[in-house]
Amino acid sequence: MRELAYYEAKFEALDEIMSADERVHLINGTFLSLSPHRHVFQNLQKKFSERIFAPPISELGFCGLATGAAMAGLRPIVDLSTGSFIYEAWPQVANEAANAYSMSGGQTRVPVVFHLFHGLRGGGAAQHSGSPQAMLWNVPGLEIAIPSSPRDVKGLLKTAVASDNPTIFVDHTRLLDIRGEVPENDKPIPFGVADIKRSGSDVTLIATSFTVQVALQAAEKLASEGIEVEVVDPRTLVPFDLATLLSSLEKTHRVVIADETHQSCGVAAEIAARIAESGFDKLKTRIRRVSTLDVPVPYSPGLEAHIGPSESRIMDAVRAALA
Amino acid sequence: MFVIRHFEENLVPLHDQGVFGGHYHLYVGQEATGVPALSCLRADDYLFTTHRNHGHLLARGVEPKRLFAEILGRVDGLNKGKGGSFHSVAPGLGFLHSSGVVAGIIPLSTGTAYAAKAQKNGRLTVCLFGDGSLEEGAAPEAFNIASLLKLPLLFLCENNGKYGAGRAVAAAQSSSMAAYPLTELPKAYKIPAQQIDGMDAGLVHATVSEAVEKIRRGEGPQFVEAQTVRFPGSETNWPTVPKPTDTAFAWDVSDVPEKAREWYRSCDPLLIYIRELVEENRASRDEITAIESQVKSEIAAAVDFALNSPYPKPEEAERDFFA
């Protein structure tokens, strides 16, 4: 099967989406952050210059513009670039876009996509390493997609743009160079369908975004210790596929959740709560979380590595679940 | 103008009787701005309004009974009771979304204007907001974007604090805008801006007509500040009606409590307009009185309709938050 780099799959998706639908406009950014590949955005710029808007540095303003344009029938994809920048646009995202459909009694649709790069990226320090998806999961009215592989980024981006709801598309710069299979003419990936990234019978390891890749490496190493880990990727937080997680638990009876949002009220916390509510009787041991420690992200490389859901922390948690 | 006045004068006692909760804001005193301004628009134009939206919706032709029902939280409301006073919408009349967040609509209005420009459909957007909105950062961000893109957008600022710097006359302790007159702010972004008497219906019509023509010619956004004098019933934390309006007040305000009398005598745009019609022989006192009594009975019927409309079933709360 054909193999692509993650960023290539993502740009193939953007190209196909824009070619197929004139309502799609790109607003701000290059969708590649500071990646050395960001020049590939120029290809889109040449091809679709009339549908690409480079706005002033006004996140509140241009997220509002995109939201209003979506109300009027366009399908804008906004690149906030660094995830923490969505805090500048919070009123428009959390208080206008997310509420419009409900507040209008189901009359006004807001098919906008807010794309952002979250998480620990190496030297981002406290203000450029945010993972706002946990806070956004606490805002009803937003869909949240969070890919971890080349095939998923392409398929989920297509579904995000096709959705009639405001969607947060949570990306990670450390995924951009990962290579993986992406079939030609692949179908969009429906929201609310988790993916088993690796089968195993001993422990269910739920992970999201770049942490899926870390989890897969941890699983390989644990296999050499004779521990078979099942890595499950929810792929979307809203809607959330609890059923696939629970059926994995039927087999393993043990769960570790690894994710880069901060621990308190984080993504792992919500997943743990849902499993505890619906699958407690399947568990042979307590649920374990491997999240980013509850501190502002420090700059120095060793400090940053210390607080994240690293391979060693994940392996320790899996071993502890089996102890 | 009669519809707006008698609508709101009938709304206040419903709140006082506890028929609906929450807080709400009156448009009374600004009728000579909204009614003529909105008459300059095309049927397919977009409008955004705020927490002070009743007058705009009614001026555009919303049925009073459906607006009453929405404010009372009933199933026959414009938004099926999901929005209430602050968020009433009428997509068929161009009102896609009404925001109770000060300045929330200003970035959104650049979005429908952006979409109309992209779709080359000639639709104009009117963004209606109060002087307080200019204090939010969203306003200058949106002015900048609107000006850079030459968007087909009319910013109509209804300053209901004439004789003071914006909110100063109302509840605020002191002036709250350093950019004064308020037109200085849009002018800084090269948006043509003018300040007019918002109690002069003819002047509002002439000014807005001209601004709309310029926008349709592709000259980009325009800003109009219409000044009105705040209705004395809006000067308290909770709206009150000093005395239900009657056409006879145009010539004799002795029935009005003394504290509010001066406003009705010299600042009430509805009474100013009535005197104008009679003095210019465009209508007789009897004709106006006949129209008023017809409106009064229509409003009474609309209140009955809303009071008899059922509340939504509680489980409706769980529907319609995703398209």
Image (cartoon, helix red, strand yellow):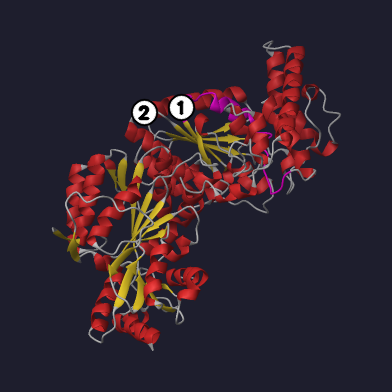
Image vertical order of residue B93 relative to residue B48, above or below: above
Q: Is residue A38 visible?
A: no
Locate residue A263, reporting x and y percent.
45, 75
Q: Chain of mark 1?
A: B
Marks 2 and 1 on same chain: yes
Locate residue A190, reporting x and y percent.
34, 52
Q: Is residue A196 magenta?
A: no
- Residue at the (59%, 47%) spot, across then down: B316
Image vertical order of residue A266 relative to residue A41, above or below: below
Residue for badge 1: B44
Image vertical order of residue B136 relative to residue B84, above or below: below
Mark 1: secondary structure: loop
Q: Is residue B42 magenta?
A: yes
Q: Residues within 10 Å of mark 2 (few under 14, many from 20)?
A: few
**Magenta stretch, overall SS:** loop
Residue for badge 2: B121
Q: Earlier in the sequence, mark 2 or mark 1?
A: 1
Amino acid type, callout 2: Asn
